[in-house]
Amino acid sequence: MKYTASILPRILPVFICALILSACSQQQAVKKVDTNSVKTPVQTMVSTSGGGGNGVSGAINANGGSLSTISNDDLRSQDLAGDSRVNTIDPDSMAAINELMDSKSYTPADLNDPNSILAQRIIYFDYDQATILDKYKAVLAAHAELLANNPQIRVRLEGHADERGSREYNIALSERRAQTVRQYLSFKNVDSSQMETVAFGEEKPLVPSHNDAAWSKNRRVEINYLTY
């Protein structure tokens, strides 16, 4: 007991100092807040459309901040640039898609415009295939819009094949190609009475040569306008 009482006056000041230093360090740690770790309010995307059909999109802060508007053209360019599926389409098809996105309602006069998408009236196919390639769907959609809005217009869908294979096989293949285009246009609201099909097989080559370049041009369906 005497020993404890004799050292207590020596230990007590040291203990008190330690407590004071500990409290000071904790207070400084509280003050040193990393402002970079404070997150800004979450933004909520909203979209509205006016009576004229021109959409407006923007971002509003959760705490009621201002609205920043983005035009439809900006949205389209951002979507196309960020969509890997769109970026896989070749440039010619991308131009056709862009024209459709900006398109007016097509009229028969557009058929005489060499700069119109309607000037493209040949759909090409892969070897021994009757499946419509993605890059031609925009072209067919444009023709379908014109036909659906002008029921007096009629077309003949002429199917062709390259020279490889028997005559009978190529007639059947070219018929399948013409029917595939017909079905696609029908799906786009073109009346069946506006369309007729004919299969030429290998009889009318577009390029009368015997190589891959010629064959690729001869595997086709031509859209021939009969009345407009």
Image: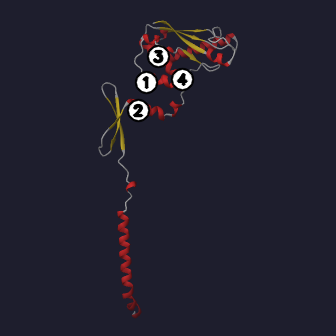
Q: Residue furthest top?
A: 227
Camera-side residue: 208 or 65? Answer: 208
The three-letter amino acid code for the residue at tag 2 is Leu
Residue holding disc 1: 101
Q: CA distance from mark 4 to mark 3?
A: 16 Å
Q: CA distance from mark 2 to mark 3?
A: 24 Å
Q: At x 66% / y 12%, what residue is drawn?
A: 170
Lower sequence index among marks 2 and 3: 2
| Foreground: disc 4 or disc 3 | 3
| Foreground: disc 2 or disc 3 | 3
Residue holding disc 4: 135
The three-letter amino acid code for the residue at tag 1 is Met
The three-letter amino acid code for the residue at tag 3 is Ser
Q: Quick check: 35 left or right of 220?
A: left
Graded by Cα atoms within 10 Å as few (under 14), some (14 to 19) or many (20 or more), the crowding at tag 3 reads some
Residue holding disc 2: 75
Camera-side residue: 112 or 218? Answer: 112
Q: CA distance from mark 2 to mark 1?
A: 12 Å
Q: At x 38% / y 73%, what residue is drawn?
A: 22
Graded by Cα atoms within 10 Å as few (under 14), some (14 to 19) or many (20 or more), the crowding at tag 4 reads some
Graded by Cα atoms within 10 Å as few (under 14), some (14 to 19) or many (20 or more), the crowding at tag 1 reads few
Lower sequence index among marks 3 and 1: 1
Q: At x 37% / y 68%, what residue is drawn?
A: 26
Q: Residue furthest bottom?
A: 2
Residue holding disc 3: 116
The three-letter amino acid code for the residue at tag 4 is Lys
Lower sequence index among marks 4 and 2: 2
Quadrant assignment, res 123: top right
The N terminus: image quadrant? bottom left
3 lies above or below 122: below
